Image (tube, grey):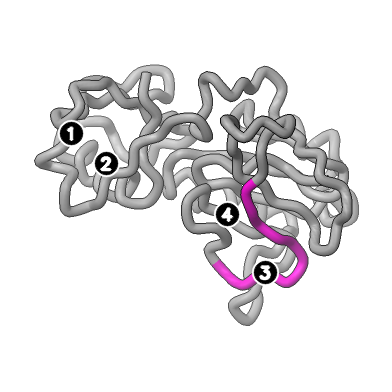
Amino acid sequence: MAVLIEGISVVIKVESIFSKYPGGWGQFKQEVPNKTLCSDNELARVGFMAPDDVRHYCNFLSTKGLIYLADGQAQDIVVADQIRGFTCKCTWAEFGHVNLNDNSNQKITACRILNSDNYQVFIPVGWSYEHSLSKEHTFIENRNIKNRTIPLENENNLDTFLDKKAGDELYLGRTSRHQSPNKKSFFVRLKQIIGTIGLKKN
């Protein structure tokens, strides 16, 4: 079995949630900061679009007794980037691409426990390929941000930008904010965000 990987995903061993997380699975589910949770009963996945939100959530999980890294290797948690794969060495899970429902026009990225022989991919409740990062996302390198995008607004944990090159509106979902959204700090944050994963078209 496997879980969907989109944007930057935090993947956690389910057995670690049951054995270490105070309150177990029930409390873990209540404290997930967005609606991207999915699980195949071996791995749980929570997705993000901004690196700062990933760091914030991994730090939060560490306060609950889950260990991200030890000696450069993933322990209870591994971070997977939709484009680049695992961000550190992981000996207990594998990352790859599959066709959703055997449809070659709907390629998605997934992660499963190592040596699993079940190919079913679990997705978040309410997720659809048509409105997903798997179908369409935009990746913008750091050096191109100022020339390529214009910040438009941020409201309800959603940052909106104009892609000057394509003329499209782009959006970036957020789960945490550590700076006020004035133009200066907003653009510094934007540099960190887009250079790592990219934005979803509206």
- Pointer 1 or 4: first along the chain: 4
Q: Badges 1 and 3: C-beta atoms under 8 Å apart?
A: no
Residue 5 horizontal/vertical position (percent): 61, 43
Distance between mark 1 and mark 3 Cα atoms: 35 Å
Q: Which residue is mark 1?
A: 149
**Residue under the image location 72 percent in, 67 percent down:** 75
Residue 55 horizontal/vertical position (percent): 50, 53
Q: Is residue 87 above or below residue 34?
A: below
Distance between mark 3 and mark 4 Cα atoms: 10 Å
Q: Badges 2 and 3: C-beta atoms under 8 Å apart?
A: no
Q: Is residue 118 above or below residue 120?
A: below
Which residue is more in the foreground, 48 or 113? 113
Which residue is more in the foreground, 175 or 161? 161
Quick one: which residue is furthest to the bottom in this view?
Answer: 71
Distance between mark 2 and mark 4 Cα atoms: 20 Å
Q: Which residue is mark 4?
A: 80
Dot 3 surroundings within 10 Å: few (below 14), some, or many (20 or more)? some
Numbered disc 2: secondary structure: helix
Q: Which residue is mark 2?
A: 190
Q: Which residue is mark 3?
A: 90
Dot 1 surroundings within 10 Å: few (below 14), some, or many (20 or more)? many
Nearest to the eye among marks 1 and 2: give it: 1
Which region shows up in magenta?
88-97
Q: Quadrant of residue 153?
A: top left
Numbered disc 3: secondary structure: loop
